[in-house]
Amino acid sequence: MDIERQFQQYFGKDCLIAAAPGRVNLIGEHTDYNQGFVLPGAIDRHIYIAMAPNQDKKLNLVAPEFGENYSFELDHMRPVKGWPTYLLGMIYMIMPEKHLPHGMDILLIGNVPIGAGMSSSAALCSAFGLALNEFFKLCLSRMQIALQAQKTEHRFAGLQCGIMDPFASLHGKAGHLMKLDCRSLEYEYIPFDFPDIRIILVNTMVSHSLASSEYNLRRQQCEEGVAVLKKYEPAIHSLRDLQPQLLEKHRAELDEIVYKRCHFIVEENHRLLNGCNDLKNHNLNAFGKLMYASHAGLSNEYEVSCKESDFLVKEINLLKGVKGARQMGGGFGGCIITLVEHDAAETFTRDIREKYEMQYGKVPDCYVMNIGEGAHILKPLA
């Protein structure tokens, strides 16, 4: 295994190895932090963590692919710039009494694209959380690890995200999506049984930061809507509880932007629930229409799209063999997720690359994804 060989080269000893996948989300965007529903699946691209104890009482981190290495004192479990903050955060959130009994040497590699909306940060937190759990025999459940990963995003990366990303990375099941209730944390595996369909992500090549003020602003706007409407229906604790009729009845009392944000979330939750039924009924054409409707809402109501994303979805809709497409992830760039017939996949990739290059002067990366297993320990420490 390449990561084991690299760890031996850097540190010269045996190691524990954990892997956690990125994720795609077929439908249900920005619904997780509104306590609604999401429909993610783990993918066959991973972040790998190798680790072993050391005696110098430091946290030594190496990322060969970035050409970076860091060293932290064991009492330095505070937010920092860059990817090490996720490891420091997971230690702070997970470890009893917030400290390590000894130092650790850690090496990480991966093939989850950074900044493409596949949640590389959640994969990193999930892999490291699972490794810590195994390493120190903490007996945490996967859901407990996911919740600590979410807290790490909040407190160490400044992103007020929902639970979806680490949940999907830790609970993935090959050939299945996961309908997650982000309030109760109950979930149901939904078969994605379409052997003639390929999931293809088309990268806008537009860099985005989920920790940007715009992302957290959307959450604040949703909470503002809840605060107004709760006066008329005390049972409303989040937009998950909001019925369309109540929203329309009191529309005039909401700022127009707040109304649009609320309307999108209400409709997106309904789209997801209908979409699960479509998948169970093997009706991919109906599901694909919901994906296009989701993108229209993301662009026009939630306003987290960009001109590159809108261009791709419009052009993809004109290509043969495509069932559905929409922007995926937090927004402001990243990837368009598409469902494409197997026989059309090669032509699709060629054509969309040509169209995008003609429009923007750059060739987008395209990734063919399979729905895979969640995080797991590849090799325990001997």
Image (spheres, helix red, strand yellow):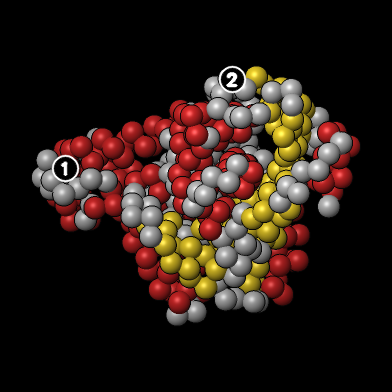
- Tally the numbered discs: 2
Residue 346 drawn above or below residue 149: below
Secondary structure state at the residue bearing disc 2: loop
Name the residue type under label 1.
Answer: Lys
Secondary structure state at the residue bearing disc 1: loop
Q: Nearer the viewer, residue 321 or 382?
A: 382
Q: Are marks 1 and 2 in contact (CB under 8 Å)?
A: no
Q: In the rendering, which numbered label is found on residue 230?
A: 1
Looking at the rendering, which quadrant does residue 85 occupy? top right
Q: Nearer the viewer, mark 1 or mark 2?
A: 2
Q: Nearer the viewer, residue 206 or 83?
A: 83
Looking at the rendering, which quadrant does residue 65 occupy? top right
Name the residue type under label 2.
Answer: His
Identity of the residue drawn at 70% across and 43% down: 49
Q: Residue furthest bottom?
A: 281
Whether residue 329 sits left or right of residue 255 in the image: it is right
User: What x and y, as percent, mark residue 357?
Assistant: 73, 47
Identity of the residue drawn at 68% across and 49% down: 18
